[in-house]
Image (cartoon, helix red, strand yellow):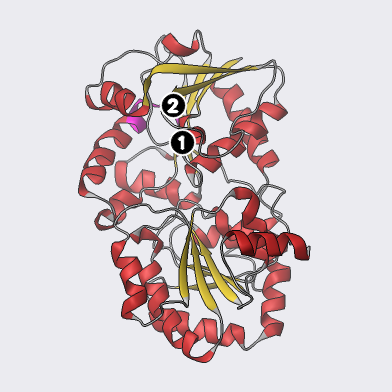
Amino acid sequence: MRIGIDVTSALTQGGGIGRYTRELVRAVTALDGRSTYHLFAARQTAPPAVPDPLPSGKHIQLHTAPLDERWLYRLWYRLRVPAPVQWATGTLDLFHSPDFVLPPVGGGVPTLLTVHDLSFVHYPDVYPAVLVKYLNQVVPWSVRRASHVLADSAATKADLTAVWGIPAEKITVLYSGVNEQFQPVTDVAALTAVSRRYQLDDTPYLLTVGTVQPRKNYQMLIRAFAPVAAQWPHNLYIAGGKGWLYDDMMAEVARQGLNGRVRFLGFVADEDLPALYSGATLFLFPSLYEGFGLPLLEAMRCGVPVVTSNSSSLPEVVGKWAESEGQGETAVQLSPHDQLAWTEALQDLLADPARRANLVANGFRQSRRFTWEMAAKNLLRLYQSLA
């Protein structure tokens, strides 16, 4: 097969969808040496977000558009000019867009579109209004045109059916995996190097990872942490690049009198994350809504006890049936709106090392269920059935 994949996000986004695209492309091209992969990207106006974002090989070709991402969006999604992606890639048997929107694809070629979540529908107030308007126009238009849709979770699949009436048989759930680099880091030199890089001291800490934007619910977490900080020496570190509407989140630190106890670390490079996870006493994920929640698996794989929201897809990730199946508690799951419950859970866990140890053991077993190799096998089967 000649398979086209839009890898623009792999080049431009350090985390989130960029990481999803990089990992999936690496895994499927490593698994499938018989097909040729035609990776398509908008013209880049800045260096890649991460080093070596794309795989290489005789069966992999990169095709760069003459226009940058901004102009392609104007051409394809605002003006809806039907210039097919094949003018850059050449002939294709299948085209996969892993980032919400589907460019024009000519010649009746089957298309696959990944929709990660519908947070912009459920929580429009946590996004800039212009972005919400754009997504509500372009994403459903892309979904309707796609031959088939990939959803990150059963929760997202249910959303697509409930919100836009997409037939369930048109949607396949494809779970993400965890890169094997995520494992407990015990080497003192490696831990010290990362601590120095992000100007951390020897104070114990709680950690959360994700782009700084309102959907991540960091303001609630900062408020919930304030009583904990009064009793425990731990700091709270928030690792993630700035997204949008983040000023109030940063101002919350001062309002709670937590200057010096809560720190925004900025974007943390993939190679530094395992050490940062490994040094944490607890990993916290209070998000209002997620299509999947990859940081939960990364933390579990690194041996950190997890406290997470019980919203959207997150129970799927941490194993909502684990306790009933006799696997034990894999993570503490709480309402993202119950600030008091978060405060009490953090205090209880900090005082209970035995429970933390159980969470680590059970969480590690849960995380092993998710691999990029399995995701690639399932994706390749879907490619073959569509093409």
- What element does badge 1 sit on? helix
Residue 291 location, x and y as percent? 46, 51
Numbered mark located on residue 12 in the image? 1
Region in magenta: 142-148
Give the vertical position of 214 relative to 257 (above or below): above
Q: Which residue lies furthest to the bottom in this view?
A: 231
- For the residue pair 213 and 287, the one nearer the viewer reads as 213
- What element does badge 2 sit on? loop
Q: Which amino acid does label 2 sit on?
A: Gln
Inspect the magenta stretch and tell me whether residue 140 lies in it.
no
Q: What residue sits 62% from the left and 33% below the top?
A: 52
Give the vertical position of 142 relative to 219 (above or below): above
Residue at which label 2 appears: 44
Q: Which amino acid does label 1 sit on?
A: Thr
- For the residue pair 252 and 196, the one nearer the viewer reads as 196
Cβ atoms under marks 1 and 2 closer than 8 Å: yes
Does the rendering let one see residue 266?
yes
**On-image quarter of the C terminus:** top right
Does the rendering let one see residue 186?
no
Q: What residue sits 64% from the left and 69% below the top?
A: 330
Residue 224 location, x and y as percent? 42, 80
